[in-house]
Image: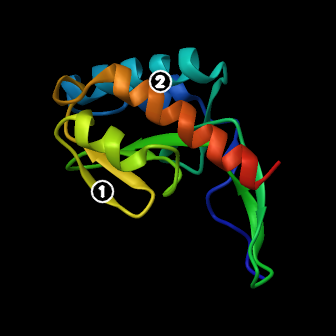
Amino acid sequence: MAQNKTTENDLSVTDFLNNIPDENKRTDCFNLSDIITKTTGLKAKMWGTAIVGFGSYHYIYKSGREGDAPLVGFSPRKDAIALYLSSEFKNREELLAKFGKHKTAKACVYVKKMSDIDVEVLKEMITNSVARISSLYP
């Protein structure tokens, strides 16, 4: 079975974030990292070369594929910041309705800038997502 490409490593989160070309996105990502750390109590770590992850869990699918993934994470993409959350967490739809300007795709929530969203709703989404993943993969 193939190894996962996106694994936790010792690359510097600060260096990665400092290399984001757009100053506003860079600032947003540093703020997002602080928000996630304060909400979860988990330290930011690099996963692969482009994902900032917090905590980890080990999954095993019915197919037999297994690996590790961050409990919550984000990645600054060209057009938006991708937030990696559970695709099914408590009050997901209600929270997304109050969250602010965003797009979704399965487990990802995309935001253009932090000023577009409600940070208190984000904190609740993070907390509920971590709880969901932790209950599925103790």
Answer with left or right where residue 72 lies relative to residue 23. Answer: right
Disc 1 crowd, CA 10 A, few/some/many (<14, 14-19, 20+): few
Front residue of 121 and 28: 121
3D distance between C-alphas at marks 1 and 2: 20 Å
Residue indicated by mark 2: 33
Q: Give the residue displayed 30% in from the left and 56% down from the top.
A: 104
Vertical placement of 130 versus 77: above or below?
A: above
Q: Helix or strand or loop: what does disc 2 sit on?
A: helix
Residue 14 position, x and y percent, is 50, 23
Residue 26 position, x and y percent, is 30, 26
Vertical placement of 102 versus 41: above or below?
A: below
**Which one is earlier in the sequence, the residue at label 1 or at label 2?**
2
Q: Is residue 18 visible?
A: no
Answer with left or right where residue 41 lies relative to residue 35. Answer: right
Q: Is residue 14 visible?
A: yes
Residue type at tag 1: Thr
Answer with left or right where residue 90 lies relative to residue 132. Answer: left
Front residue of 33 and 63: 63
Q: Give the residue displayed 66% in from the left and 49% down from the top.
A: 133
Residue 104: numbered disc: 1
Residue 117 position, x and y percent, is 23, 29
Front residue of 128 and 59: 128
Residue type at tag 2: Ser
Location of residue 3 by image quarter: bottom right
